[in-house]
Amino acid sequence: MIHWLMLLAVMTGGLWGTAEGDTLGSLPATAPTTRGVFSGILQSGQMAIGCEHTGWSLVDASGRELYEVDVRRVMEQANAGKGRRVEIEGSLEQRQRVERGQTTVLVAQRIVLEKQ
């Protein structure tokens, strides 16, 4: 019986819980490592295996992903900056994903359009 309860807890995330700001399929995040302002083009609609992506990315001019971005605290600002050059003030976190392994995520605190 205890084995079934443990299996149920693991399958529902009961033993890991979730870190604030984490998505499904992730183990808890480590402490933020770098704070700063990061520039690039903000894109949405990204996907990864096992739903292990926030859906938002900061990319360079060629479309190469610089960082996966967690925009939950600034969703209105993110929607206003979608597809445009932005500056994101935030911190970089290392998150351990089940399928993708160690991943750097930029946790946005503020998003502003870059001055032209």
Image: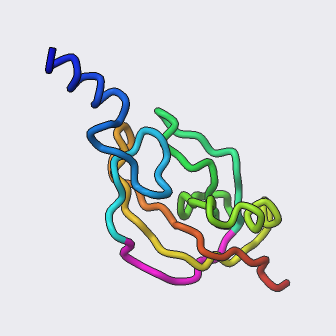
By what rule are the colours in the image chosen? Answer: rainbow
| Magenta stretch in the rendered image | 32-40
Quadrant occupied by the N terminus? top left
Q: Residue at x 47, y 81 (%)?
A: 35
Corner quadrant of residue 15:
top left
The location of residue 106, given as percent across then percent down, is 52, 66
Prevailing SS of the magenta stretch: strand
The location of residue 63, given as percent across then percent down, is 66, 57
Q: Residue at x 77, y 81 (%)?
A: 114
8 w.r.t. 86: above or below: above
**What is the tally of numbered marks visible in this picture?**
0
Q: Residue at x 39, y 48 (%)?
A: 18
Q: Does residue 35 belong to the magenta stretch? A: yes
Question: In the displayed structure, does residue 9 sit left or right of residue 48?
Answer: left
Quadrant occupied by the C terminus? bottom right
The location of residue 111, given as percent across then percent down, is 70, 74
Question: In the displayed structure, does residue 99 sit left or right of residue 48?
Answer: left
11 w.r.t. 34: above or below: above
The location of residue 101, given as percent across then percent down, is 33, 46
Task: Compare residues 100 and 64 and report the one nearer the observer.
Answer: 100
Q: Does residue 87 belong to the magenta stretch? A: no
80 w.r.t. 8: above or below: below
Corner quadrant of residue 84:
bottom right
Question: In the displayed structure, does residue 91 sit left or right of residue 82?
Answer: left
Corner quadrant of residue 56:
bottom right
Task: Compare residues 37 and 40 and report the one nearer the observer.
Answer: 37
Extreme-left residue of the structure: 2
67 w.r.t. 9: above or below: below
Extreme-front residue of the structure: 1
Q: Residue at x 45, y 58 (%)?
A: 20
